[in-house]
Structure formats: C-alpha cells, structure tokens
Amino acid sequence: MNSPGSSLSLRRLEASDAVGAFTFLAGAFAVNRAGVAWSDIARLVFAYGLTVLGPGLVITRRFPTLTRVGRLSVAFTAGLAAQLLGWAVGVATGQTWLVLVTPALFAGLWELAFRRFAPAPRTQETAEAPRSRWWAVGALLVSSAVALHSLALTLWRITPLDHHLRWYQDMEWHVAISALAMHQVPPTDPQSAAEGPLSYHWFSNAHGAALSLASGVDIDAVSVVAWFLPVGLATLGLAYEMGLALSRSALVAALAPLLIAVPPVALFSEVIDTGSTFALIWVSPSHLFSLPLCLLLTWVVIIILRTPRVPVPTAALALLLALMGPGTKVSILPTLMGGLGIVTVHALWRRRGVVRPIVLGAVGGAIVLGTAPLFAGGGGGSIFLLGATARQLRPWRELQKMGREPGFDVLALFVVALLATYAVILFVGAIDDVVARSMFIGMFLVAVAAMFALAHPSLSQVYFMRGLQPVSAVFIAWGFVALVNGARRRSDTRAVALAAGIIGVASFGVALVWQRTSVYEHLAPLRMSRMAPIAGVVLLLALVSIVLLARRKRHPRAALALGASVLGYSLAAPVLATAYTMTPEYAPVVKPANPPTATSPLTEDELEAGRALAQANRESSLVATNVHCAAVVTVDHCDARGFWVSAITRSPVDIGAWAYSSSARIRNGVGGYRYMYQPYYDTTAFAQNERAFSAPDRQVLDALAARGVRYLYADSRASRVSPELADLTTTIFSSPTVSVYELPPPSKAASSAS
C-alpha cells in the first residue's frame, strides 16, 4: 500500500511523463523540419539510448531524485561522461564498434564497483517531497517550448543543411573540429596543422563525433541540429529538479527553467550589455554543452557539503563530473572552487566543517592544473586588466577613437552599470540554507572577478557569468520564493500574490517604456551628466536592497515589494529580446554577391568540390587550400575566418583559416590589428602554400607532401589558380571555379623530385 507521499509522487510522475512524451514528439518533429530524416532521427535516438542515457541510468542509480524528469536529466548528463570515454577508446583504437560498447562496459564496471551500496534510500526528506503542481509541470513545458522555438530560429534557420545560406562562421569551425574528432584523439587544430593538438574545451565536438559514429548520421546534421535539443532540455529538466530538491518548493521548480529560457537582467542602457539576455546561446556549442554539467556538478557538491555522511557513489559521481569539467568549459571548475572558498571561510568562522570544502577544492585545483595543457588554450591572448569587460565595451572604444582616454571615473560608472544588470542576484540573500547560499555567492564572485580582471580578445571572459546563469536561475527563483513565503507569514496568501503581481507588472511596464526611449537606446555614457545620476540611483537601490534583505524577517512585505519590482524590471529586456528572435524577419536571407562577402552563400561548385573531397579523403588526410578569408578573396589582413573548407570537406587543413588559433590570439593588437586580422604566423610556410596554387612546380608540391598534405582544394574566387596544377597532380574534381587535386604520396614525390 502506498503512503500518501508516494501516491502524490505517482500522480506527479504521470503528469511529467505526459509532458516528456509531448516534448519528445515535438522535438523530433522540429528536428525533422530542420532537415534530418526520420530514419536518421530513429538512429540518433538509439545511439543516445545506448551510449548516453542507458549508461547514465546505471551510473546515477544511487543518486536521489524526486521526479522522473529529474531522473532522466541527471542520467543524461552523467551518461555523457561514459559516451566520451567510448569515443576516446573507439577512435584511438580505430574500432568504431567500441564507441557503442564501451559506455555500457563502463556502466557495468561502475555498478560492479558500487554494488554493495544500495540505491538511494527513501529518506524522510524524499518521503516528504513537495507536490509538483500542474502549473509547475506546465511551466517546464512552456520553458521547453520557448527554448525549442529559439533554437529553431536562432540556429537551425541560419544553418540550413543544404548550405543555401552562409553559416555563422563559428558553426563551421565547430563542425570541422567534430569531423576531425571522428579520426583523432585528441583532435588537432583542423585549421592550422602546425599548431598541433587543439588546446580548447572541445568535449562538445567529441560528443558530436561520438554521436555521428554511433548512429551513422552525417556530422553536419549532428553538429548543428541533433544534439542541441536534448542537451538544452536536460538543462531545463535539471534546473526543475535541482530547484525542487534544494528548496522543497514546487514554485521554485516552476520558476527555475523559466528564468533560464528568459533570463532576468536589469539593463539601464543598450550599450552597457554583454549579451546577458540569453542563457541558451545556441551558436556557442561549448557553452551550451557545459550548462547541464555545471548545474549537476554544483548540485552534487552542495549535497556533499550538506550531507552528514557522504555516500561513496555520490563522491565518485562528483569526481566523474569534475573530470569532465575542463574539457566541457574551462570556467566550470574555477567557478566552483570560488564557491568552495567562501564555504571554507564560513566553516572557519564557525570552526566546523572545514575539511570537506578544502578537499573538494584541492581535487578541483589538481584537475584544472593537470588538464590545462589540453583544454586551456581557449584563453589564448587573455591578459589581466583592471575593469576588463568595461574597457571592451563599445562606448569605451568610441571614447578612445575620439582621442579621449577614459579615466577612473568613467571606468567606475561602467563597472557599476554592468554589475547592476545582475541586480536579481540579491535575492540569494533571502535563502536560509547557509551552505548553498555561500556556495553560490562564491561562484558569483569568481564570475565577477573574471569579468573585471581578465580581458580575452573575443570578450570570452563573460562566459564565466553566462555559464553560471542556469545555476543563478535556480538560486534567484529560490530567493524570490523565500521572500514570498516570508510575506505570507504576515499576510493572506492571495493578498501577497496580488500585491507582488501588481508591483512586478508595473515595474515591467516601466522598463518596457524606458527601454524603448531614445535616451535608453542612445544613452551616452560619455556624458557624465546622464550616466552619473543613474549610477547613483543604482547604488542607492542596491544599498536599500541589502538593508531590506538583512531585515527581511522584520519587514517581509517591503522586502517582497522590492524583490517583485527588481524581478519585473529585469524581465523586460529578455522578453523584448525573446520576442525579437521569435519574429520571422530575424533569420537573414542573403543573396549571392560578386565579389563575395563574409555572408554571401557558397557557390554550388564550392559545395560540390567539398563533397567530392570528403568522399575521397575517408582517412582525413591533410589538405592544402588557398581559401583563408571569410570573404573568400585572399587579401592582406583579411578576416581569417573562412573555416568552411575544413567543414565541408571533413578534412584537416595545413594552413586554412587561422583566426581562432593560439598563435593569432596571442598576437592580438600587433600592428593595430585584432587577432582575426593577423597574418599567418609562419610567413615562409604561408608563401609556400600560396605558391603551390598560383605558380606550382614539383619542388613546392614536394614540400607540401613532406608536410603531410595529400589533397589540394583550389578555389579561383580566393586567388589565382594555375592551370599547370592539373598537370602536376591527379584531378579528383574539376569545375570552372573550383578544383580538387591529389598529390603523389610523399615517397613518390621525393623520387620524382630527385
């Protein structure tokens, strides 16, 4: 006979099952509309089940969850580790079948190692699990729908699998890495072979490679369509479950995924923004792939810190997830270590519980240091700079162009304005759970420190904060509900809800009006007369908020009123941004251009040549090309982000588009040029590469063959291609503008030269 608690749980699971089934079918339909055949979708589902979800269910069998949504989301995230292991073993040995088998073997060994530990018991805490109301499940469905629609419009619509539109260059860069990861462990830089192993957090690319190998589905379909949706839904499901488990509130569970789909941010000026109105940034694969891992690892660490006696399987799960951290996103572990640092300080003050956070921090630090050579290269070109993100904003650069070097007063104003955008973080002060609150505060402080102390050429330091956003959503929801509950103890529930709703809607309306004014759109931070009063108001509000939060138990209704006002204002900008991306006009329609531009579509000749080379180069041998620039035509100091050759040919390139290479990033600013406009670092090798196309002879082709080059991709739109090249090589593909050639093997080339 079921207890009352378990019967409620069963009803909740039935509701979430219906939502899950509907979301699965809607997602499959959307993936099909994006160009993936139903037969490929079936193979992808099978591959996910065999290499990710199945092993994950075994690995997390002893991890306590409250709902089936949470169970599947936790299992999916942990199962990614098993899949990555299978990818590494299968590719390293050249045995593709091991990509399918290894995850199950790993899960079996995991079960064998922890078989004496029973699955998570039904403790008093889980037995008294809160009811997941229909509106909470509905909120999860709404957030999933918003995420799916934004994915379809902001990524799938601008990366058509038939390439009738020019893809966003970063997606071409990632596809090239994923294609190479099907043949190499670890992958090298597919755009610049001389750079050696790719020093970047490339686990999202390895995930795409593993999924393609396991399913047999084309790497294009996997890399820009297939894997984004399950990872995004796992993020929302984890936020739902984590909010429910930590706060014991269905309202927190409902709000958390909604605040990921529409992340609150208090913008006061259009130019003082780091793109924080989106958490699910679909055009950044490594960022998106890191979100569920950051959520689950944070949750597991909090469990370890709060539990009197840590179960061994939970500690092992934390270690497994931590080992994934650097390869998924290098910011994950440093951020978590900041949280552990604040927990340690608090433990020292209380004089108990010091050992556990120190040990966890030491393990995290060892992993970061040990994996830095493999994964830390994404920070190439980073420097320490006071106020870094503020100094990289457009208004700061405009001041410099006008010959006015901004002073410390302007820097302080910019920093205040940027920090004010995260005003909703103050809600965390209302959370009574000291360990969880301290953990999040430390993580947030590390993200802030990264934003204002590290300057990356691509402004990538902001991903410390962006990567924290799903965790922030859980804690913001938790803090806001804590304010609501505090006010309910003094007033009628309906009165509290009505008052909070009116205040929130009013603040939302004020923000909408403000953000549509010319003052907001053109607010000149250069004019201190406008910026200084706003900064003063922001500081005053922050001070009042801190005081009210500190005295929230004495003045709960005032604290809630302020909280509703801040939340309402902070939702205006993301709602406007979401509405913009939902409009059909958002997706660009670009027509061919002559001469080509960075956004004009590739020609049919270029695509056909790429497919022909991909077919011929099954072993992923090295390719030489004369295409380097985003606008195709090779000129000095061009935007060297023409990553498409490596992407469509599925081949590593000897000297391709080097803009994102470590050598380019560390030369950022040399000669007054940003990193993507820097010339190739080895001018001799580059000249030799170009001569192979414009003025080929046996000697220069032998030199390319000696570097490992086997094929040439020659595009006359990029630079002159000599007709003599066909006489010195074997033609694989030929068209009026693009040709593909095969060089003689190195040994034959050497003998011909002699």
Image (cartoon, rainbow, N blue to C red):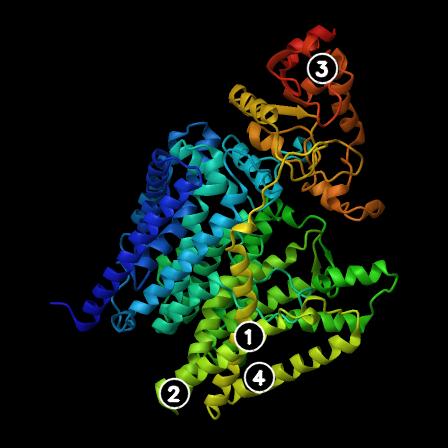
- Image quarter of residue 696: top right
Say if mark 1 contacts mark 3, CB within 8 Å: no
Secondary structure beneath dot 1 equals helix
Residue hosting label 1 = 569
Q: Nearer the viewer, mark 1 or mark 4?
A: 1
- The image shows residue 312, relative to residue 378, as above or below, that is below
Q: Residue furthest left?
A: 1
Badge 3: how crowded within 10 Å, few (<14), some, or many (20+)?
many
- Image quarter of residue 234: bottom left
- The image shows residue 542, relative to residue 582, as above or below, that is below
Percent from the top left, x then y, of residue 82? 40, 44
Which is nearer the N-term, disc 4 or disc 2?
2
Say if mark 2 contacts mark 1, CB within 8 Å: no
Which is nearer the N-term, disc 2 or disc 1?
2
Label placed on residue 495: 2
Q: CA distance from mark 4 to mark 3?
A: 70 Å
For the point 38% across and 73% down, which residue is it?
A: 247
Q: Is residue 343 left or right of residue 231?
A: right
Secondary structure beneath dot 4 equals helix
Residue hosting label 3 = 702
